[in-house]
Image: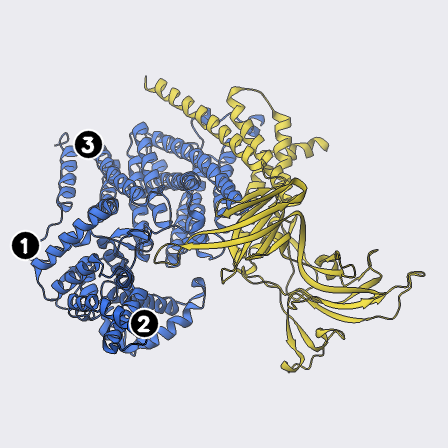
Amino acid sequence: MIRKAFDVITSLKLTIACLAGAMVLIFAGTLAQVHLGIHEVQQRYFQSFFVWWPPEGSRFRLPVFPGGHLIGAVLLVNLIAAHARRFRWGWGKLGIHLIHAGLIIMLAGGLLTDLFSVESYLRLAHGDTKNYSEHARLMELAVIDTTNPEFDQVTAIPEASLRGKREIAHKSLPFRIVVKNFFQNSRLQMQGQTRTGARPLANQGPGAQVIVEALPRATGIDERNVVSAVAEIVPIDPASGAPQPALGTWLVSDALGAEQGFSYAGRTWQIAIRPARYYKPYSVTLQKFTHDRYAGTDIPKNFSSHVTLIDPERAVNRDVLIYMNHPLRYRGDTFYQSGFQKDEQATILQVVHNPGIIAPYIACVIVAAGLLLQFGYHLFGFSRRRKAAVA
Amino acid sequence: MKRFFPALVLGLALLWLASSWRPPRNSSGDFDLVKFGKIPVLVGGRVKPLDTVARNSLLIIHSKQTLRLPNGSRIDAMRWLTDTLFVASAADQHPAFVIQNDEVLGLFGWQQSDRKYFSYTELKPFLRQIEEQGAQAEKLQSVERSAFQSAIVNLRNALVLYQRLKNSLQPEGAENFVGELQLFSRGIPEAAKAARQREGGEKFDQATLDRVAGLMQRYQEIAEMAYILPIPPAGESKDWSSLGQALLESLLAREVHPLAQAYAALGDAYRVRDHRAFNQQVDLLRDRLAQEQPRATSRASYEFVFNHVDPFTHSMTLYVLAFLFACISWMAWDRPLNRTVFYLLLLALAVHTFGLASRMYLQERPPVTNLYSSAIFIGWGAVIVALILERIFRDGIGAACAGAIGFITLIIAHHLAGSGDTLEMLQAVLDTNIWLATHVVAITTGYSAMFLAGMLAIIYVIRGVFTRSLQRKTADSLSRMTYGVVCFATLFSFVGTVLGGIWADQSWGRFWGWDPKENGALLIVLWCALILHARWGGYIQQRGLMTMAIFGNIITSFSWFGVNMLGVGLHSYGFMQKGFPWLIGFMLSQLVLMAVAAVPLERWRSFRTSADSPRPKDQPSDLKFVPPGLAVETTRK
């Protein structure tokens, strides 16, 4: 039984099945991008164990095809097991071994990247200084204690926790946050401007005059979700831990610009939904963003951001020019010129933190060497035989 | 006859090339548009000869490079451009605008008749409508536009281009432009004086001030409209400028730019049909530019020659000729024809290489920078590999492949050139010669090899099923060639794909983003790996290999064009939509060929009857060629 399973795991048929499966998956995933957008497809097809399909109008989902993680993992196991089983040394096989060793490194590196890399964005207007970058899509509910004039204390609740519509308690907060409603994508309108007859869901702050309309999830490349939630603040008795009467409900939304304030227990608080932040031990200031075009055309020739990097910990204070194909690498983060705001007054830098970055470089060299060796070996063998045949 | 035939054909081919490459000359007593066509100007961010501007503009507006006038005579692009630049009233009558969409014609209340070219004068009453409809359609992404919307956007763009051309070297409709500039030049100091007087509260000459201000406004307008920037950088400015801009700057320089005066004299001479004055001004202009911009002028002349030689059309003809001879060689007269084919292909390749190298010289870039050049390069790569195969096997198969692929890829390139300048400037992200030279070249070489493998397989199937010419020996060597080429494709596709990942990592911050173009490349790599493993495991034999190689054509074409038609992702700058039916047609044809290959072997004509060639047992005859890798399942049985 075990022997049989081992046979399957190390079989060439499994390799072929994985390759074919990967092709079907990639083809389907490529076509699906037209409607779902690239990020959704990545999550559903490639960074998952199964591709799920919910039949029309039903609440359950069926796994219809193995996802990228499953195929990749099986291929990796198959590759390692087959080599462990049949490894023989020989010059004629060196190429094959190199190719597959390189592929193992590449697959493993891909897994590492998928699990641990973080992509975020840094948006800077001229003169702005920031010590954090923001996630492109994920939001967070920030609860900020602004009592101390020296610093703010921020408690950030990730979007995933809001989605569950649970009660959220944290030791830094003297109250619980009860998520009454959560909207993945929404549109806000003033109460008077709609005729739907819907009533505001919140009773505090500007949200008390606003109607929230739920929208389907955005899928287009340029479309963004407007995440909104209705949160109730329920104070907790510090002695008994029992809930007290609620302070009220607030509408928090990505579409509402400013934080909303309230005070409780002698402290002042602000809450807001904002893009999830990644704080850095250093700061970046935009000095100037430039966008050159070719003379007499609208074809972009170059984008560049002239920034100042300040890191007190490491005594760094220097100017850096970031432009196309020339990123800034600093303390494990890499900053790329990614785009700009329409009026060219602000730059958008992509910030990537990826511990698996080196794997593809090594893998590429190893596999290419292996391919050259292998095909070269057979080419020479072939021409030797041909010469022998001719003679 | 047999001995001389190859030399004879080669001689005729050379003669044909020589005759069509005779340097263009002007009949005396005519405008020297050849010399005028070599004048360098800046358009689309690139310095190019006026000849290129003429050809590309006419291609955009007319979708052809020559124009037939209502009286039946044909004029070339340079003549059309010169008319447009200097005698707008005549150019307005030329039926230059192509409209093929019946809904667009319906918009003007016209029925679709056998006429598809219309003059500006005919379209003039509908400009407003075209503008409105075009602006509406332009709000949609180009993928989402209907046929009507695409057509109206194209027409609108053509009209805008035409208007800009008319206002490039003089304000449209100027009659005596030299006189106007003299007036302007005399007016400058007078106006300056009047302005000073006004500042000082003295009495001043309002009429002079108004006249100069009026002219300034006129030049401001053409500065904004100009499509062609003819004034080279001088002094501190690093950019070429439009004629209008140069005239506005005359205000500071206190004199009208001499090149502006030269162009004005040129236009005036052309309008009054004074050949001698025109040619004199062209000489003057050229000498001056050669002095100020020696490099730009010599490159522009080179580009003119390149345009005139038209290397890709000529090599296309030679390729198709070679392919036909190669096909005939399998039926009869194989030896002399094989030699003929080889010579023809070498000649075609030489012309093709000249074209490719010229493009690289003109653009100062590696060979592939856009979809058009990828087609040129894929054909070039495939032809070289196929010729090497032909040298090794000497059976006309490599030669037939070279001819067919060379021809088909150049046809594709020809149809991709419709959007104008094929030497266009590169988007910022592509502005890196290292990656263009490595990643892009490797990937496109991989495409070449995939198409070559597919072509070999097609020859195997067609010759095997429909003719008796596929002997055992031929079948085996075809199989070996296909296998070898797939290995080659694997190497280049893999390296190219990973290099692309590294480029993406360097410039966008992620090695792999599941972008459609990346996925397409990965599909090719996976398919190659699949073929090789299936072969090594003994799951497929000769016929299976061939069928899979034909399917490789479908995957490669999807990766090359299909993903661009999805209109998503970061590589969509290579967008094209018109080719969609062609792509689907190509894919269907490959599926049909695969179905043909699935015909039972006893039905294959080659294997059915021939007594001299025993039917292959659907088994690779050369098992030693199967690499002794890890895939050894078959030997365990």
Q: Residues within 10 Å of mark 3 (few under 14, many from 20)?
A: some
Q: Earlier in the sequence, mark 1 or mark 3?
A: 1
Frontmost residue, B45 versus B207:
B207
On the rendered structure, is A328 left or right of B71? Answer: right
For the residue marked with disc 1, what is the amino acid? Answer: Ser
Please give the chain letter of the residue carrying mark 1: B
Q: How is the image coloured?
A: by chain
* Mark 1–mark 3 CB contact (< 8 Å): no
Residue B295: mark in rendering: none
Residue A13 appears anywhere in the view: no
Q: Which residue is mark 2?
A: B102
Q: Compared with residue A51, is residue B400 higher up or lower down, i.e. above or below?
A: above
Residue indicated by mark 3: B336
The colour with which the image depicts chain A is yellow
**Residue beneath disc 1:** B28
Q: Which of the two discs, 3 and 2, labels the residue nearer the N terminus?
A: 2
Q: Name the outermost residue toward the right.
A: A240
Which residue corresponds to the image point at 23% horizontal and 77% vertical from the top-left?
Answer: B207
